[in-house]
Each structure stands twice: as structure tokens, then as C-alpha cells.
Image (cartoon, helix red, strand yellow):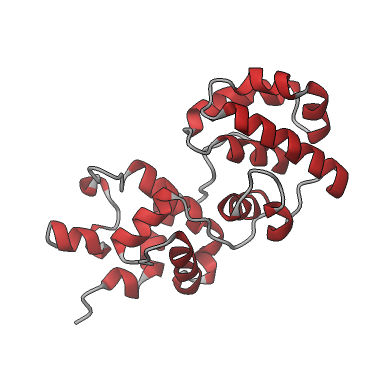
Amino acid sequence: MNKNPSAARPGEILSRLRAQNPNPTSELAFSTPFELLVAVVLSAQANDKRVNQATEGLFRDANTPEAILAMGEEGLRRHIRTIGLYNTKARNLMKTCAHLVERHGGVVPRDRHDLEELPGVGRKTALVIRNTAFGEPVIAVDTHVFRVANRTGIAPGKTVRQVEDKLMQVVPDEYKKSAHHWLILHGRHICVARKPKCDACAIPDLCEWKRRNMGS
């Protein structure tokens, strides 16, 4: 008998999450790839609600690299000062805007390596942009995805890269485009860090953590 059903049936887990939310998307507010890039950079160590509050006014005044450069770093800081590490983020965003204008004609690139050349953009952010802005079938692993992947047994790993690689191996192609969103939303709202809401979970019978800690 298979003792780890979730690892053997990742498609079933994602099928149930899809049934709950057929068209998942980011909880960050954006309307262009550039707006998403700015929002994701600002979201580091900050919650999406606070980021959305800041970007609402920012994007009304400036929502292109050229417009933010014209606004200047001090103007940018005024818009994002409610967000943690706003000074560092403002500096990085100004450099990113300059880089986009100088090397990409003001357009956010799709290539991961080009994205990772932008100040303040690492692998995870690049994958979020590729997936959410451009619809690429890639899976970015943040703290929520990491937790859900390990708890369920769908893609256990000790590092973010291990989990990412395993998810790309085991997630069926039909689910790859939306898997990041399903897993992050499940981790953010149901499979929370301290007291997971197993009673509200759609996959309790497939979860390795529940089997070990609470019984089947």
C-alpha cells in the first residue's frame, strides 16, 4: 500500500485546488508586466494588502519606467514609505527602471536571465514575472509554496531550489501554469504556518503532514 499518496498523486491535489479556484491569480494589483514587477519587488517582507495600498497611488502617478525615472527617487519613496525596507527598494527600483530603459526599451523582458540582471530581482521574482505576467508554465517557490510542498509530500525538499525542481518534475503539464497560485493561496489562507486549518482543507486525505500529525 502506498504510504505517501500525495507524492504519488500530485495531479489529484492540484485538481482539487483547481475545483475550488479555477482561475487563480496573484493577490497583488497590477495591469501590466511592469506594474507586476514593481509590486513583486515591493512585496519582499511586506504583505500584499499594504503593497496594493501603496501602488494604487504610485501607478496612478507613474506606471512606466520612464515615468518613475521622471518622478525621481524621493518622489518614489513618498509613495512607498509605508512598506518595509522602502529606501532600499526605492534605490533598486530606480536602477531597475534605468536598466529597462537603457537595455530593453522600457519593456520588461521575458527571459529569466535578463530579469535576474535587474537590481532587486532574484530567481523567485523572475519566475513570478514569467508565470504571472507572461503565462509561462514555471513555478516560483516562496515560503508558502515551500511549506505546502513539504507538508503535503507533493515535492519535499530542504531548499527552495530542491522544491522548485521537484515541483517541475511531478506537476502535470496541464497544471504548471497555475500551480504557483494554487499552492501559494492554499499556504496563505489554509495551510498556514502555525495552526493549519485542516478542517477547511480540500486535500486532507492526501496530506502527508496530516497523516503523520493528526491521523487519517
At x 79%, y 35%, the residue is: 65
| Image position, residue 38 (x, y; %) | 66, 37
Q: Is residue 15 above or below residue 96?
A: below
Taking 214 as reference, is 48 left or right?
right
Q: Nearer the viewer, residue 165 or 11?
A: 165
| Image position, residue 77 (x, y; %) | 65, 22
Look at the image and tell me in which quarter the C terminus lies.
bottom left
Count all numbered tags in the image, as a single digit: 0
Q: Is residue 202 above or below residue 119?
A: below
Taking 181 as reference, is 63 left or right?
right
Quarter of the image for residue 42 reads top right
- Name, please, the residue furthest toward the bottom: 1
At x 60%, y 39%, the residue is: 41
Q: Nearer the viewer, residue 101 or 89?
A: 89
| Image position, residue 55 (x, y; %) | 62, 26
At x 52%, y 49%, the residue is: 23
